[in-house]
Image: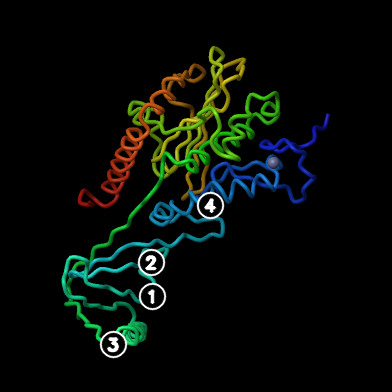
Amino acid sequence: MNMPNLCIYCRNELAGSNPPSVSHCFPDAIGGLSYTTNTVCVTCNNQINSQVENPVIRGLAFFQNIWRIESRRGKVPRLRAVLRIAGLEGDVVLDETGTPVGPMVLKSDKKSSSKSFSVIGRGDQVEEKRLEIERKYPSVQWTELPLGNTAESEVRIELNLCGDKFRRLAAKVAFERLSQIRASEIFLGQEFDDIRRFIRDGEGASLCCGLVSDLQLLNGSLNFPLPNHGVAIIGHPQDPILGAFVTFYGLFPYWVVLSTRYTSLMSFDDLLLEHPQRRVEEHPVLRQNLGSVRVNWSQMIEKYKAGKQESVRIVRDYAIEKFRSALDEYYGKQST
Ligand SMILES: [Zn+2]
């Protein structure tokens, strides 16, 4: 029997779209590979893209740039940084190879009393930029940078890990992964209404997603190698909760409650890892005994509810530490 294709969010019938509508579990803009076809309607897809995916993706440019992960147009995003040389500082944009783009204007930092400027970059660009600044500020004082100064650059990463958007994206990954492996089941009944609503429209009455701050889990089964994106879906016959874990770049881990009224007939666990740089998918077996993975979901939810800021602190420290040891491994133990 041929069932019509229904949108997994609004459950409206998908008009026989040709070519089929494609929705990536992990957004293709962050190197996501796995996708579903004809499961998400254009309206829902656009809404989720503009409200959830795009705002989160913009904040992840640092990771895309440092790992040279190509976005959907095959481009590595540029990166904004602050460059400091000899008491001067300025904003720079680094291209996909980490090279500053265009001439950079450096100003004396806020601490110093005098205002002086310097422009660095390609000769002709420097001259042009200097003239432009002199027209604006005729009394400008130029500082010649002595050779051999060490430059220091700083990149600020501001991620709202507990925010609505990041959590909705994690929920979307889990839900679309589920629709990929259990296509027909997710239309049945209302047991997935909460998660649908959360992903498409934001927070509802029940909490569907939060940060994982259990270090035993983070250093154990969820310790995916950088920069893998990972999604694991877990159900157990004695548990009405069908849940998932979603990790971005091996650094930012979320739990997702897909349904609290799910009847799992047998143990159900599925793990997908995607390496966004090498562009390969893996399906490793969950490290604990396959077929009997049980998660104390309610404990995880309560812990998150009781201390969101504490969860953010734990995950931030975990991510920094993991990222730093990866750098140490790569460059030798001297990075700061
Ligand atoms: Zn829809």
Q: Give the CA distance from mark 4 to mark 3.
A: 42 Å
**Label 1, residues with CA under 10 Å away: few <14, some 14-19, many ≥20:** some
Tags 1 and 3 touching, CB below 8 Å: no
- What is the number of the mark on residue 102? 1
Q: Which residue is mark 2?
A: 93
Q: Nearer the viewer, residue 91 or 124?
A: 91
Asked if residue 267 is positioned above or below residue 247 in the image, the reply reads: above
Q: Earlier in the sequence, mark 4 or mark 3?
A: 4
Q: Earlier in the sequence, mark 1 or mark 3?
A: 1
Q: Which residue is mark 3?
A: 138
Q: Earlier in the sequence, mark 2 or mark 4?
A: 4
Q: Nearer the viewer, residue 329 or 45?
A: 45
- Amino acid carrying label 4: it is Asn
Q: Give residue 257's position: percent from left, percent from top.
A: 52, 27
Q: Give the CA distance from mark 4 to mark 1.
A: 26 Å
Q: Give the CA distance from mark 2 to mark 3.
A: 26 Å
- What is the number of the mark on residue 54? 4
Tags 2 and 1 touching, CB below 8 Å: yes
Q: Look at the numbered disc 2 and say if its residue's Cβ is closer than 8 Å to ligand 1.
A: no
Query: Which quadrant does the N terminus fall into?
Result: top right
Name the residue rendered at 51%, 44% in the picture.
Answer: 280
Q: Secondary structure at mark 3?
A: loop
Q: Give the CA distance from mark 2 to mark 4.
A: 20 Å
- Amino acid carrying label 3: it is Pro
